């Protein structure tokens, strides 16, 4: 089971996404079985942010002085409890998600879910540096998104 601690440092998120913690935790229940971790307790933290703050984090941790849609920070410390695992942190920028500004709530949620899935896979050590890895990650993203589409409606 996946449990997400959702933090928000930008009030704009509440305009398009009510009950954020419930939304993301319920979303994970629609993931394909192999990503539900049924006999384990999987934890991660999601920070709902904005361009200003994500740019600071991107500069500090990746030495890139620009804002981005999402940052993922996998946590790789070994745990003695194999059933309890902390995956890491995901940060998403509201400004990126709300483009164009007249985006419907449904389209906003759809975009956020796609980006969240991308960040989630990074926490599981997927990457897209090499083309073969990119294709593998893209395939998993599409499978997960297909399984959660009914949830977004």
Image (cartoon, rainbow, N blue to C red):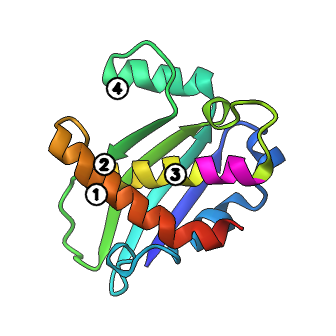
Q: Which residues are magenta?
A: 106-111
Q: Position of residue 7 (x, y in %)?
A: 62, 49
- Quadrant of the image for the C terminus? bottom right
Name the mark nearer the viewer: 1 or 2. Answer: 1
Instruction: Verify CB contact (< 8 Å) between mark 1 and mark 2.
Output: yes
Nearest to N terminus: mark 2 or mark 3: 2
**Near-viewer residue (36 or 61):** 36
Q: CA distance from mark 1 to mark 3?
A: 16 Å
In the picture, measured across the screen, residue 63 lies left or right of residue 108, that is left
Q: CA distance from mark 1 to mark 2?
A: 7 Å
Nearest to N terminus: mark 4 or mark 2: 4
Residue displayed at 39% across by 57% down: 141
At mark 4, the secondary structure is helix
**Near-viewer residue (140 or 46):** 140
Residue displayed at 79% across by 58% down: 18
**Near-viewer residue (125 or 61):** 125
> Dot 4 surroundings within 10 Å: few (below 14), some, or many (20 or more)?
few
Residue with the mark numbered 1: 124
At mark 1, the secondary structure is loop
Q: CA distance from mark 1 to mark 4?
A: 19 Å
Nearest to N terminus: mark 1 or mark 4: 4
The circle on residue 61 is: 4
Residue with the mark numbered 3: 114
Residue displayed at 41% across by 48% down: 119
Residue displayed at 57% across by 69% down: 27
Residue with the mark numbered 2: 74
């Amino acid at each position: 089971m996946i449990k997400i601690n959702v933090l928000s440092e930008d009030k704009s998120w509440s305009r398009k996404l009510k009950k954020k913690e419930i939304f993301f935790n319920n979303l994970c229940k629609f993931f394909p079985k192999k990503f539900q971790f049924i006999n384990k307790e999987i934890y991660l933290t999601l920070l709902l942010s904005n361009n200003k703050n994500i740019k600071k984090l991107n500069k500090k941790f990746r030495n890139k002085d620009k804002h981005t849609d999402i940052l993922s920070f996998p946590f790789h410390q070994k745990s003695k409890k194999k059933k309890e695992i902390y995956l890491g942190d995901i940060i998403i920028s509201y400004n990126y998600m709300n483009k164009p500004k007249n985006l419907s709530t449904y389209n906003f949620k759809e975009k956020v879910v796609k980006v969240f899935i991308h960040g989630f896979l990074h926490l599981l050590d997927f990457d897209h540096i090499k083309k073969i890895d990119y294709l593998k990650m893209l395939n998993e993203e599409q499978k997960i998104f297909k399984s959660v589409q009914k949830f977004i409606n």
